[in-house]
Amino acid sequence: MHIGILTGGGDCPGLNAVIRAVTLALINECGAQVTGIKRGFLGLLRREVMALDAPAVAGILAQGGTILGTHNRCDPFHYFGAGGADVSAQALDYARELGLDALVAIGGDGTMMIAHKLARLGLPVVGVPKTIDNDLCHTDRSFGFDSAVAVVAEALDRLETTARSHGRVMIAETMGRYAGWIALEGGMAGAADVILLPELPHRLDAVVERCRQREAREGYTLICIAEGARADGEGLTVAQTVADSPDPLRLGGVGAQLARQLQPRLQSEVRATLLGHVQRGGSPTPFDRVLATRFGWHAAELVQAGSFGRMVALQGERVTSVALDLVAGRNRPVPAGHELLAAARGLGVSLGA
Ligand code: F6P
């Protein structure tokens, strides 16, 4: 058996742990040949691969990033390198030339969509859900999320001490695209006083009111805002539009914008910190190392069972799998009835309502 592995989309902590687990499980359990495709689907077009064996994956469990490299703009069905043409046949030809029996695609929604389309064209595919945003459908967790939340929590811990010392309003802006998972869990883990999510457009007046209450009582305020959050009636804050990208909106700057809106209405100084790619870099948390390892092993089991067109998923405590067509092209926002939202409200955290 000859199996290919690739990592697509933005990187995140835990990718190497999956690569290691898939490689070791396939070699140990069925003596498979394993080949890494470099830089996501681009490697199938540019014919760039590397052999994966036990020495190649030694020592990478705790390493951030991906030893295979990745790409978040290469879609063979709409390839910008060829003016947006469908060059998927080239990718499939190369997979056939390599003699791949199956491909393990580790990625987010974009990668799952491409994997699903390739599966429909006859390439046996297994998907593994990766994204710090935690917004993939039918899995309670994607690996990378816990590591990002840990960064946000630590940042808020640090912002708290300086906010308290100076009597300031400190705003931390998280990633997460159109989902608020990172801001919600990170904000709760870091004891934010105000948490603003894309799913719940906020009222500026409500945020001002909470900051004023805290100015009078505690003397400082911590705000955690997701990059995709917006005030009622306002649009997204876009840092940049990116040509030749499946997602042309690069979000960023909503924290600084909120600081500008709040400052004239408060006595305390308001400062914003953009956490940015710090949330995506570095070593995975122990939780993500274990989750990624479980996902990788499960993907190897699916491959050996010939169970293709599926994505590995965590449902409750159990690792299982779901059909790729249930996942492709969909996202999972924080549901309005989520327990942590209720807990936040119960503890007096303002969600900007
Ligand atoms: O999807 C993961 C993510 O980190 C988002 O949270 C963020 O909006 C985006 O990727 C940033 O992508 P890039 O690295 O291309 O700017």
Image (cartoon, rainbow, N blue to C red):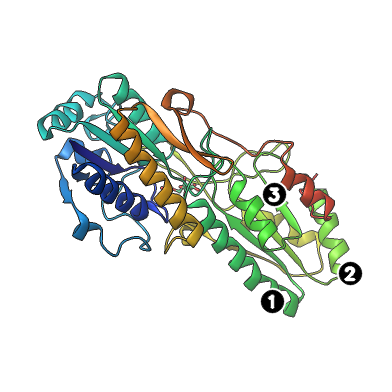
x and y, in percent, of residue 273 in the image: 59, 64
* Quadrant of the rendering where the N terminus is positioned: top left
Is tag 1's residue or tag 2's residue first in the polypeptide sequence? 1
Quadrant hosting residue 348: bottom right
Could you tell me which secondary element the residue under label 1 belongs to?
A: helix
Could you tell me which secondary element the residue under label 2 belongs to?
A: loop
> How many numbered markers are drawn?
3
x and y, in percent, of residue 153 in the image: 61, 63
Q: Residues within 10 Å of mark 2 (few under 14, many from 20)?
A: few
**Residue 104 seen anywhere in this rendered image of the structure:** yes
Q: Amino acid at mark 1?
A: Thr
CB contact under 8 Å: marks 2 and 3: no
Residue 17 vs residue 262, the one in the foreground: 17
Residue at 19% across, 42% down: 32
Q: In the displayed orientation, state which residue is furthest to the bottom.
A: 165
Q: Amino acid at mark 3?
A: Leu
Compared to residue 13, the image places residue 270 above or below, namely below
Is tag 2's residue or tag 3's residue first in the polypeptide sequence? 3
**Residue 259 seen anywhere in this rendered image of the structure:** no
Give me the C-alpha separation between circle 1 and circle 3.
21 Å
Residue at 34% across, 42% down: 8
The residue at which mark 2 appears reads as 217
Could you tell me which secondary element the residue under label 3 belongs to?
A: strand
The residue at which mark 1 appears reads as 161
Q: Amino acid at mark 2?
A: Arg
Is tag 1's residue or tag 3's residue first in the polypeptide sequence? 1
CB contact under 8 Å: marks 1 and 2: no
x and y, in percent, of residue 46 in the image: 16, 39
